[in-house]
Image: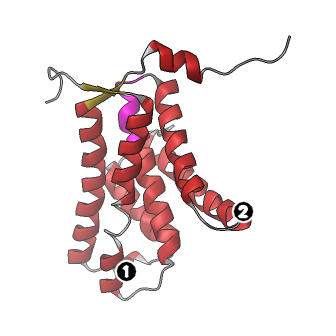
C-alpha cells in the first residue's frame, strides 16, 4: 500500500514524458492477440485507441492525488506531444485526433462514471476495445479473453504505479512561466 511511502516529485514536463513513453510501449500488446483470433481490424486505429486508453488511465490515477488542473495540463501535453510528433498532413492529424478523442470520451465514461457501474473497469475497457474494433465477443475464445483482460489490467496497474510512486510538483518559477498572459488592457 503506497499510503505511507514518500512519492518522488516530478515536474509537469517530466510527468508528461513518463506517461507518453509508457503509453507508447503499450500499443503493440493487443495486436498479437487480435491476430491470434484471426479477426480483421485497423492496426493504426487500434494503436491510437490504446494510446488514448492509457493516457486516460493515467489521468484517472493521477487525479486521485494531484490537483486536477495540473493533471489536465500533463495529459493535454501528452496528447500535444503525440500530435506534434506526427509527420503527416493536417487532414490525417485531424482524423487521428477524432479517433483518439472518441476513445478518450468513452474511457472517461468508464473511469469517471455518472451512474453506478456493476462490471469492473478493466472488463468494461475490454468490452470497449472489442466494440470499437467491431470484434464480436463470440469470436473471442476464453483463453484469449483472459489474455486480453490480463493485458488491460496491466495497463490499469501501470497507471496506478505511476500515481503511487510520483506526484506532480512544479517549482514556482515554472508555474509563473507557464501561466496564461492576459493581453486585454
- Main SS of the magenta part reads helix
Where is residue 90 drawn, in percent x and y?
Answer: 72, 62
- Residue 5 position by quadrant: top left
Membership of 88 in magenta stretch: no
In the rendered structure, which segment of residues is drawn in magenta? Answer: 58-66
In the image, residue 6 sits, relative to residue 77, either above or below, namely above
Name the residue at 34% across, 24% down.
65
Given residues 116 and 86, the one toward you in this image is: 86
Where is residue 92 drawn, in percent x and y?
Answer: 67, 67
Where is residue 87 drawn, in percent x and y?
Answer: 60, 65
- Residue 60 position by quadrant: top left
The N terminus sits in image quarter: top left
Q: Earlier in the sequence, mark 2 or mark 1?
A: 2
| Residue 11 seen anywhere in this rendered image of the structure | yes
Name the residue at 45% across, 77% down.
135
Where is residue 172 drawn, in percent x and y?
Answer: 46, 13
- Asked whether the residues under the numbered discs 2 and 1 touch, taking CB atoms below 8 Å apart as contact, a structural biologist would say no
Q: Is residue 64 left or right of residue 99?
A: left
In the image, residue 54 sits, relative to residue 27, either above or below, namely above
Given residues 83 and 107, the one toward you in this image is: 83
Q: Nearer the viewer, mark 2 or mark 1?
A: 2
Residue under numbered circle 2: 90
In the image, residue 75 sits, relative to residue 94, either above or below, namely above
Name the residue at 33% across, 60% down.
25
Residue under numbered circle 1: 138
Given residues 170 and 131, the one toward you in this image is: 170
Local packing at callout 2 (Cα closer than 10 Å; few below 14, some 14-19, many 20+) is few
Given residues 48 and 10, the one toward you in this image is: 10
Amino acid at each position: 500500500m503506497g499510503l505511507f511511502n514518500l512519492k518522488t516529485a516530478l515536474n509537469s514536463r517530466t510527468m508528461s514524458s513518463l506517461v507518453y513513453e509508457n503509453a507508447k510501449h503499450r500499443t503493440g500488446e493487443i495486436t498479437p492477440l487480435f491476430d491470434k483470433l484471426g479477426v480483421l481490424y485497423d492496426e493504426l486505429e487500434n494503436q491510437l485507441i490504446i494510446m488514448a486508453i492509457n493516457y486516460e488511465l493515467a489521468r484517472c490515477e493521477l487525479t486521485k492525488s494531484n490537483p486536477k488542473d495540473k493533471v489536465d495540463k500533463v495529459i493535454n501535453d501528452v496528447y500535444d506531444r503525440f500530435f506534434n510528433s506526427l509527420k503527416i498532413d493536417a487532414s490525417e492529424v485531424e482524423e487521428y485526433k477524432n479517433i483518439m478523442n472518441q476513445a478518450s470520451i468513452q474511457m472517461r465514461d468508464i473511469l469517471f462514471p455518472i451512474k453506478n457501474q456493476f462490471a469492473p473497469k478493466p472488463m468494461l475497457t475490454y468490452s470497449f476495445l472489442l466494440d470499437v474494433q467491431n470484434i464480436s465477443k463470440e469470436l473471442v475464445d476464453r483463453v484469449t479473453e483472459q489474455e486480453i483482460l490480463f493485458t488491460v489490467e496491466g495497463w490499469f496497474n501501470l497507471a496506478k504505479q505511476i500515481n503511487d510512486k510520483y506526484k506532480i510538483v512544479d517549482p514556482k518559477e515554472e508555474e509563473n512561466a507557464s501561466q496564461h498572459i492576459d493581453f486585454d488592457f
